[in-house]
């Protein structure tokens, strides 16, 4: 593992995870990772290698049997307000409007409207949802629903953003567009991001570092630092020969 200049925001050490049941499943073994403040890190790896399990453990949504997981230097004991999580399929409430859905988390946390309302306004614009505030989820395209789901989490202003294949269900063109938006938002707000994706190109485009997981039980088998200039623009990055080299290197590992 490479050295990090600052103390890691997310630290996972020798984590072990077993699912009990009729047939015990060892999902993770000796997983290590350390993510620094404002870093954008992606995780790639074949289906079943434990990516989602790892993300859920960091989010405090799943218990684990061995090792240590800490966020901001404190052991993770359950969900915490500094972490926002986005899953593959958005779970918006169908009877609420887009705006009501996006405000839901902030309302449940009893944040004052004077704090979240301007933020929501800004996010609506950034995510291309202006004019759709009063629509209901079923009136939106899949891409817009997913953007709204991301907005719902970003409205809470989490310091850490965990995303599990957030664009996995969308077509390639929509994905590309959302990735550019995601990068723009990240470049402005600088959350610490951990993204699980199955797209190598997406991981290289977005990340400071890419971790590759593999095996059953899964572990981190490779780590590549992406040394491409920021801010990244799709045109300039895709023309950069390093971009293609990273994709080739990662493809050979998968
Ligand atoms: P990935 O996200 O990389 O596809 P997962 O983290 O979903 O992998 O799964 C890792 C392993 O743990 C798989 O073998 C999967 O079947 C198992 N697993 C995941 N969730 C559960 C669960 N709730 N109960 C039992 N086994 C599970
Ligand atoms: Mg998964």
Image (tube, rainbow, N blue to C red):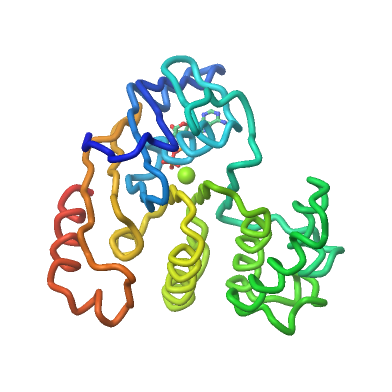
Is 123 positioned to the left or the right of 75 in the image? right
Spot the residue most to the right.
95
Residue at image location 56% in from the left, 36% down from the top: 59
State left or right for residue 26 relative to residue 112: left
Q: Nearer the viewer, residue 147 or 72?
A: 72
Q: Residue at x 65, y 40 (%)?
A: 81
The x, y position of residue 56, in whole percent, is 54, 36
| Image coords of residue 138 (percent x, y) | 75, 71
Residue 237, given in percent of the width and then of the height, sits at 25, 74
Quadrant assignment, res 157: bottom right
The answer to whether residue 116 is above or below residue 62 is below
Give above or below for 147 relative to 236: above
Say which quadrant the N terminus sits in: top left
The one of 163 and 188 positioned closer to us in this rendering: 188
Residue 119: which quarter of the image?
bottom right
Which residue occupies the foreground of this view, 73 or 130?
A: 73
Say which of 168 and 70 sits in front.
70
Q: Position of residue 242 (x, y in %)?
A: 14, 66
Q: Residue at (74%, 61%) from the top-left corner? A: 116
In the displayed structure, would residue 1 be above or below residue 151? above
Q: Is residue 4 left or right of residue 106?
A: left
Q: Is residue 51 above or below residue 183?
A: above
**Residue 62 left/right relative to 239:** right
């Amino acid at each position: 593992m490479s050295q990090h200049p600052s103390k890691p925001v997310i630290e996972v050490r020798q984590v072990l995870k077993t699912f009990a049941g009729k047939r015990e499943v060892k999902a993770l073994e000796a997983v290590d990772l350390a993510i620094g403040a404002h870093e954008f890190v992606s995780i790639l790896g074949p289906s079943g290698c434990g990516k989602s399990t790892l993300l859920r453990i960091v989010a405090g949504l799943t218990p684990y049997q061995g090792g240590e997981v800490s966020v901001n230097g404190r052991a993770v004991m359950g969900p915490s307000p500094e972490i926002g999580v986005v899953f593959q399929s958005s779970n918006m409430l169908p009877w609420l409007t887009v705006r009501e859905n996006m405000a839901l988390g902030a309302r449940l946390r009893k944040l004052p409207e004077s704090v979240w309302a301007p933020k929501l306004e800004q996010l609506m614009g950034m995510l291309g949802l202006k004019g759709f505030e009063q629509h209901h989820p079923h009136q939106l395209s899949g891409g817009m629903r997913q953007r709204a789901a991301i907005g719902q989490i970003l409205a809470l202003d989490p310091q850490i953003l965990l995303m599990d294949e957030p664009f996995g269900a969308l077509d390639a063109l929509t994905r590309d567009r959302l990735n550019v938006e995601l990068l723009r938002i990240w470049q402005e707000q600088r959350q610490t991001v951990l993204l699980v994706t199955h797209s190598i190109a997406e991981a290289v485009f977005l990340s400071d570092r890419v971790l590759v997981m593999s095996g059953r039980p899964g572990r981190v088998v490779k780590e590549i630092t992406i040394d491409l200039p920021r801010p990244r623009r799709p045109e300039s990055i895709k023309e950069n020969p390093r971009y293609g080299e990273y994709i080739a290197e990662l493809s050979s590992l998968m």
